[in-house]
């Protein structure tokens, strides 16, 4: 089901996996320092791949 949704949105499953892993690294922390930078890096990789 998730794969179908990603395919319909044009989202690579590896990108979703990276986003989830970045979030999981923050589990248990009161402040999610660095999460925005992780997401920026992941989304930046999408932009770079599309060029």
Image (spheres, rainbow, N blue to C red):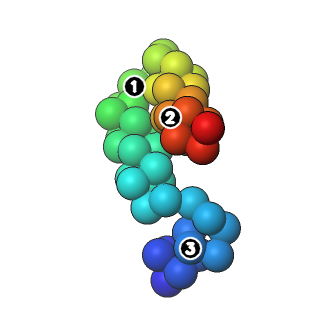
Percent x, y for residue 19? 46, 44
Q: Residues within 10 Å of mark 2 (few under 14, many from 20)?
A: few
Q: Residues within 10 Å of mark 3 (few under 14, many from 20)?
A: few
**What residue is disc 2 on?**
45
Element marked by disc 3: helix
Q: Residues within 10 Å of mark 1 (few under 14, many from 20)?
A: few
Q: CA distance from mark 3 to mark 2?
A: 18 Å
Percent x, y for residue 16? 47, 54
- Seen at 49% across and 59% down, the residue is 12
Element marked by disc 2: helix
Does the image show residue 43?
A: no
Q: CA distance from mark 3 to mark 1?
A: 32 Å
**What residue is disc 3 on?**
7
Q: Note whether 10 is above or below 29 in the view shown.
A: below
Residue situated in front as seen by the camera: 46 or 19: 46
Percent x, y for residue 37? 52, 20
Labels 3 and 1: the sequence-earlier one: 3
Element marked by disc 1: loop
For marks 3 and 1, give the one nearer the viewer: 3
Labels 3 and 2: the sequence-earlier one: 3
Residue situated in front as seen by the camera: 38 or 7: 7
Q: CA distance from mark 2 to mark 1?
A: 26 Å
Find out whether the residues at labels 3 and 1 contact each other: C-beta distance under 8 Å. no
Q: Note whether 34 is above or below 20 in the view shown.
A: above
- Single out the residue that lies furthest toward the front: 51
**What residue is disc 1 on?**
29
Labels 2 and 1: the sequence-earlier one: 1
């Amino acid at each position: 089901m998730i794969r179908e949704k990603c395919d319909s949105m044009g989202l690579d499953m590896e990108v979703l996996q990276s986003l989830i892993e970045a979030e999981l690294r923050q589990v248990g922390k009161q402040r999610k320092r660095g999460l925005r930078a992780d997401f920026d890096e992941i989304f930046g990789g999408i932009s770079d791949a599309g060029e």
